Image (cartoon, grey):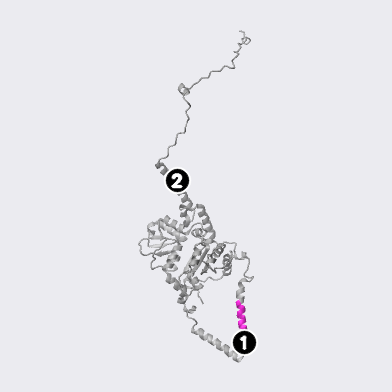
Amino acid sequence: MPSNNNQPQPAPPENWASEAVPRLDLRRKSEASSPPVERRASPRLDPSPKAQLRSTVIAWQNARAASARVAQNLPAEIGFLVHYGIASGILVAAAAKARAQGATADAVLPAEGKISEDHFYRSLARHLRLAFVDGHVTLGPATRYPQSIRAGLVPLVGCKRPAFLGAPRGKAIVHLIAAVRRNGALCAGLALTTPTHLMELVRAACREEISHAASLGLWSLDPVLCAKDGASVRQWYGGLAIAMSIALCQLMAPAATSAACGMLLSLAFIAVIWLRLRPASPVSARPRRDFGVSKTSNCRSTIVIALYREARIVPQLLAAMDRIDYPRAKLDVKFVIEEDDEETLGALMQAARLPGEVVVAPAGTPHTKPRALNVALPLLRGQFVVVFDAEDVPDPLQIKMAAGGSRRLLRGLPVCRHASPSTTPATDG
């Protein structure tokens, strides 16, 4: 059959391009005629109070579990603080610093100013579900100074519960936490307070005892060692014998006696001058590396500063104490003031952060600096003790140099047991 490809095709209409091609509208007439409806997101229903409570409890449990995991890796004496607003990073850094310094972590935190003493012990009392005391209470007759302060525990009277007031430190905190976990009823009669408040309560209860020990402690221990009663009979006879011998020699050989006396007085004068200049000699100014300044000292050092009516110099003194380069947890600073010196006490209390403890000496005689030092002497906790005047501005490395030099000098020497600080007060003579 012949193909039809060669047959002519019909021509399209002339207006084909202008004709509209009809489109099929598949929408229903009602939809096509109605205006377009704006689609809105359906509002989400608020969770019920029960659901909100459930989510809150779950979040709290998760946070509690996370805090418990962090606390397991911290020393027990500070681990509980993760539940009471202290960041875990601060606690981890304090634990590392405590290991480096050979101190307890609970001593590092307040010493570095990371937490106040009041917040620490309030949190500890809350954690152990014990009462916290920050006001006046009556201590029992068994309270002793300074033994009760060192033990951190005193009996109370006038109330059955609590029967004891404590301010544990270091390992004592660890033992207390372990005891409460084993049997909380054993510690039901215990209340907690800060070491500073405990010390104030003990000093107020033992006021007369402290005053007597500071003034007459050495005389009570051994009157021969004290100058309270003046020269003894033997001393009077010895002085009289020396005076008569000099007078007799002066009569027999005046020139020789005068020359001998002048020579003895000159030697005494030279000895005093040498004693004054000896600390400034080049022999004592050794290189700092010889004293182990670059190494962290493991020794606790105590600085005692007695002040009386020196409020104007307190800012300079506190700035000098802040500049001292020594581990803060190993530095025990005592500011000793008199009871009637309210101006100096006010200047110390106005400090933003007091780098030590204030010890108030009760009124008594003699009104001297040795007596004020005797009041603080039983409270010293350092192996090395340094006494500064209020106007002193020590070198920041002086404590490290003194501690390192003392260890070097004492190396290889036999160790002797010294008497208790409470029985060896300073003397005014």
> For the residues carrying marks 1 and 2, which lies nearer the camera in this image?
1
Going from the N terminus, do you reach mark 1 or mark 2 first?
Answer: 2
Tell me the SS state at disc 2. helix
Are the two marked residues, 1 and 2, in contact with CB atoms closer than 8 angstroms? no
Where residue 225 appears, as percent x and y from the top left, is 49, 78
Type of the residue with mark 1? Ser
Query: In the image as oriented, which residue stretches furthest toward the top?
Result: 1
Q: Which residues are magenta?
A: 262-272
Badge 2 amino acid? Ala
Q: Nearer the viewer, residue 298 or 362?
A: 362
Q: Quadrant of residue 289?
A: bottom right
Q: Rate crowding at label 2 as few (under 14), some (14 to 19) or many (20 or more) other CA atoms within 10 Å.
A: few
Looking at the image, which is closer to me, 254 or 65? 254
Q: In this view of the protein, can residue 383 be seen by the observer?
A: no
Cα–Cα gap, marks 1 and 2: 96 Å
Asked whether 304 falls inside the magenta stretch, the response is no
How many labels sit on residues? 2
Q: Residue at x 60, y 82 (%)?
A: 265
Residue 4 in the image: state x and y as whole percent: 61, 9
Please name the residue shown 61% across and 78% down the image.
271
Q: Give coordinates of residue 162: x percent, y percent.
A: 37, 61
Q: The N terminus appears in which quarter of the rendering? A: top right
Residue 83 to residue 223: above or below: above
Image side of residue 403 versus residue 214, left or right? right
| Res 260 quadrant in image | bottom right
Q: Which residue is mark 1?
A: 258
Write down the residue under mark 2: 59
Label 1 SS: helix
- Does the segment drawn in magenta span residue 264? yes
Residue 312's x, y, as percent? 54, 66
Q: Residues within 10 Å of mark 1 (few under 14, many from 20)?
A: some
For the question of whether residue 400 can be seen, the reply is yes
